[in-house]
Image (spheres, rainbow, N blue to C red):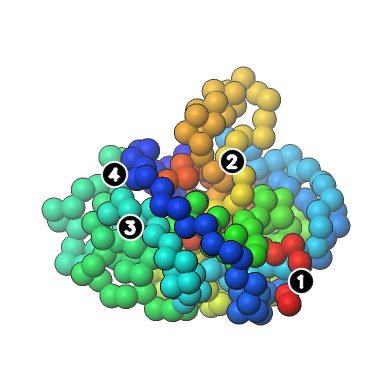
Amino acid sequence: MAEGCCPPGTGGSVAPAIATAQPVDASIHHQRNCAPVPGGRAQLGTRDPVIPGDCEGPPQVRKIPALWWGKGAISVAQFARFVAATGHVTLAERLGWSFVFHTHVPGGAAGTLGVAGLEWWRRIDGATWARPCGPQGAEAAGDLPATHIAWEDARAFAAWAGGRLPREIEWEHAARGGLGDVRFPWGDAPPDDTAHFPCNIWQGDFPHQNTAADGHDGPAPVLAFAPNGYGLHQMVGNVWEWTAEPFRLRSLSRSAKPANAAAARAGQKLLKGGSFLCHESYCYRYRIPARTGNTPDSTSAHTGFRVVYDSPPA
């Protein structure tokens, strides 16, 4: 599913997993920055799909429970507490490398390996959640989203925190903030390159120059930009968010069957929300019903996660 700014895959080169199962840490610091999202009848998909091949519609309505959502994606500071408490070693650390956007490579991308057809993604040895641009880059600020996170890393954190990754319908319901079938958490008015900056996406000439007119050339702090109606920040843009579900096309069409079979063979997982590298002209997936998939061993500088809780904060 990699396209434009969408997350590249690692090609299946998975390092052996390191067991990091730990008792749940139910201390309040995981949940005190949550917002309640009401349950009830929730919509999955839209009446106004933009990328038909992704099966963004037609809408389905199902009943879901009330949940408590992290107001932002899991931050570097939160992930650091998890690592300190459990000794968890992320997949990117075990592999020894991860994907970094070419303009963010310290000293320039010359001499680094790229992804065929997506040369703006460079394989950087030592790129991790703590140093997202690689060992020559700066340490990640604590209020930035934790990135270079594989699906299992996200699941391990969520379990330790007493929560879980969301389902797609839960994610879309929370992102809409009570507004109904809208494209964005704030409504239907799209971001632009000059005046309307409700989220962190690309402005300029991709992949060469990001004018950063919205104030951010890379990831923004997890609570930057105004929250939606449920008090959740940056449900679109900034970083892709892993969900609990496999990626599949919601279609019985003849063309969907081989695509779903290939996704299942690769074990692809669903991601939502788009990232700071998205733009309408080439990767219009920072809309609520937009969706993409990637293998669970994929890590990059624009992929993170958010945690939901089935029970209220202590």
Q: What residue does disc 1 label?
A: 312
* Residue 156 showing in the rendered view: yes
Mark on residue 246? 2
Q: Quick one: label 1, few (<14), some, or many (20+) residues within 10 Å?
A: some
Closer to the camera in the image, 164 or 277: 164
- How many circles with numbers are drawn on the protein? 4
Type of amino acid under label 4: Val
Closer to the camera in the image, 283 or 147: 147
Question: First in sequence: mark 1 or mark 3?
Answer: 3
Q: Is 58 placed left or right of 248 in the picture?
A: right
Question: Where does residue 98 sit, x and y in percent of width and height?
Answer: 32, 54
Q: What residue does disc 4 label?
A: 115
Q: CA distance from mark 1 to mark 4?
A: 43 Å
- The image quarter in which residue 288 lies: bottom right
Mark on residue 93? 3
Q: CA distance from mark 1 to mark 3?
A: 33 Å
Type of amino acid under label 1: Pro
Type of amino acid under label 2: Pro
Question: Where does residue 105 sit, x and y in percent of width and height?
Answer: 24, 63
